[in-house]
Image (spheres, rainbow, N blue to C red):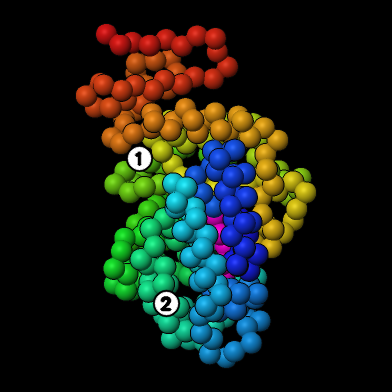
C-alpha cells in the first residue's frame, strides 16, 4: 500500500481503498512501508533527512492513526515495515547513533506511546535484514519496544532468503523470506515454530519484470497461494498487483486491483466462518488435504484439479 505521505489527511481515499481491497477482494488489511518517513513524512531515505537530530514527524503518526483506525473498524489489520534495506539507506544505520541509538530509541518510544494504544496493527522490522542488522540488535529492539508498550502488538523480523532460520528467536511471530512457497513449504514453516504465528513476509507480487520471473506471481498463483497457506494451518502473506506501476516498493504508489477480485473474495467468504481456532491437519482422512477440530466437530477438505474428493469420516 501507500506510504503515509500519500494518505495523510485523506480519509476518503482510505475509505475507497478499503472498499476495493477488503470489501471487493476479501483481503484482510494493508501493508505499509514507512522507512525514514517516521521523521519527515516526505523523505523515505534516512541519509536525506534535513535534521542532524531528527524527531518523529507528527504528520506521519496522524496518517498511520487514521489508516489503522479505519482498517480496524472494518475488521482488518495494518502491517507496517519499520525500515527498508541498506542499499536505499532506509534504516537506522544512517541515523545519528545507528541502530538502537538515541534517535532510534526516541522513535521506538514514540511508536509505543502514539500507536501502542491502537488495536489493529503489527510491525515488521523491514526487509533484507541479513544485510544490515544482527540478531542481538533485533532482540534489543524487540525487548525495548515491549517494555515501552502497555499493549500487545506482534513484532517480527524477516529471516534469510528461502531459509527457515530466524535472526532472533525473541520475536512475537516467525517471519521468512520465501519465494513461491507451496502447500508443503507452508506446512514445514508452521511446524518449525508451532508456538508462534508464521508470516511468509516476502511480497508476493504480480509484475512484468524478467529479473524476478523465478519468484513473482500470477493472479492464478495468488488464488492458489491463499488456499495453500490457509489449508496448511494458517500463514500470513503480503500480496500485490504491480502491473502498470513501478513505485509501490517505496510506498509512492499502491497495488492495482486484481482482474478477477471475485475469485479472491470467494476464498475469503469460504473461510470467513470456517477457519477457526485449534484446527489441526488431518490429511490421512482424504486424498486431498484436511483441517479439523480436535473433537471432530468441524472439518475442512480441499483438493485441486479434480471432480471428486475422497473423505473418510468413519
Q: Residue furthest front?
A: 12
Question: Quarter of the image containing the N terminus?
Answer: bottom right
> Does the rendering let one see residue 53?
yes
User: Depth check: 245 or 290 in front?
Assistant: 245
Give the SS element for disc 2.
helix
**Could you say which disc has been placed on residue 110 in the image?**
2
Q: Quadrant of residue 312?
A: top left
Which tag, 1 or 2, sits closer to the chain's start?
A: 2
* Residue 134: x %, y % from top left: 44, 69
Q: Residue at x 63, y 46 (%)?
A: 240
User: Depth check: 313 or 182 in front?
Assistant: 313
16 above or below 118?
above
249 above or below 138?
above
Residue linked to disc 1:
191
Give the SS element for disc 1.
helix
80 relative to 251 in the view: left or right: left
Sort mark 2 into few (<14), some (14-19) or many (20+) by Cα contacts within 10 Å: many
Magenta residues, start to end: 31-36
118 above or below 310?
below
- Residue 87 colored in magenta in the image: no
Q: Residue furthest bottom?
A: 52
* Residue 124: x %, y % from top left: 46, 60
Question: Quarter of the image containing the C terminus?
Answer: top left
Cα separation between marks 1 and 2: 35 Å
* Residue 293: x %, y % from top left: 28, 27
Q: Residue at x 56, y 75 (%)?
A: 59
Amino acid at each position: 500500500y501507500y506510504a503515509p505521505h500519500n494518505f495523510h489527511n485523506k480519509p476518503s481515499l482510505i475509505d475507497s481503498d478499503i472498499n476495493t481491497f477488503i470489501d471487493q477482494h476479501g483481503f484482510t488489511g494493508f501493508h505499509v512501508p514507512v522507512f525514514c518517513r517516521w521523521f519527515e513524512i516526505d523523505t523515505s531515505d534516512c541519509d536525506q533527512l534535513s535534521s542532524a537530530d531528527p524527531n518523529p514527524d507528527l504528520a506521519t503518526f496522524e496518517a498511520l492513526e487514521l489508516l489503522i483506525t479505519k482498517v480496524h473498524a472494518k475488521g482488518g489489520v495494518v502491517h507496517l515495515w519499520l525500515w527498508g534495506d541498506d542499499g536505499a539507506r532506509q534504516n537506522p544505520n544512517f541515523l545519528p547513533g545507528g541502530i538502537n541509538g538515541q534517535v532510534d530509541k526516541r522513535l521506538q518510544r514514540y511508536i509505543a506511546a502514539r500507536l501502542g494504544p491502537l488495536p489493529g496493527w503489527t510491525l515488521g522490522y523491514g526487509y533484507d535484514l541479513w544485510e544490515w542488522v544482527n540478531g542481538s540488535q533485533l532482540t534489543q529492539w524487540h525487548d525495548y519496544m515491549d517494555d515501552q508498550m502497555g499493549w500487545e502488538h506482534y513484532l517480527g523480523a524477516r529471516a534469510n532468503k528461502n531459509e527457515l532460520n530466524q535472526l532472533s528467536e525473541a520475536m512475537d511471530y516467525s517471519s521468512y523470506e520465501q519465494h513461491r512457497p507451496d502447500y508443503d513449504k507452508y506446512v514445514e514453516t508452521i511446524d518449525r515454530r508451532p508456538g508462534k504465528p508464521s508470516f511468509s513476509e516476502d511480497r508476493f507480487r504480480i509484475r512484468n519484470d524478467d529479473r524476478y520471473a523465478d519468484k513473482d506471481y500470477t493472479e492464478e498463483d495468488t488464488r492458489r497461494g491463499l488456499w495453500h497457506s490457509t489449508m496448511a494451518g494458517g500463514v500470513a502473506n503480503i500480496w500485490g498487483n504491480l502491473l502498470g506501476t513501478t513505485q509501490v516498493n517505496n510506498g509512492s504508489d499502491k497495488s492495482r486491483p486484481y482482474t478477477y477480485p471475485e475469485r479472491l473474495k470467494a476464498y475469503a467468504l469460504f473461510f470467513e466462518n470456517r477457519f477457526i481456532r485449534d484446527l489441526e491437519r488431518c490429511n490421512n482422512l482424504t486424498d486431498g488435504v484436511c483441517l479439523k477440530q480436535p473433537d471432530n466437530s468441524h472439518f475442512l477438505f480441499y483438493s485441486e484439479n479434480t471432480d471428486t474428493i475422497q473423505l473418510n469420516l468413519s
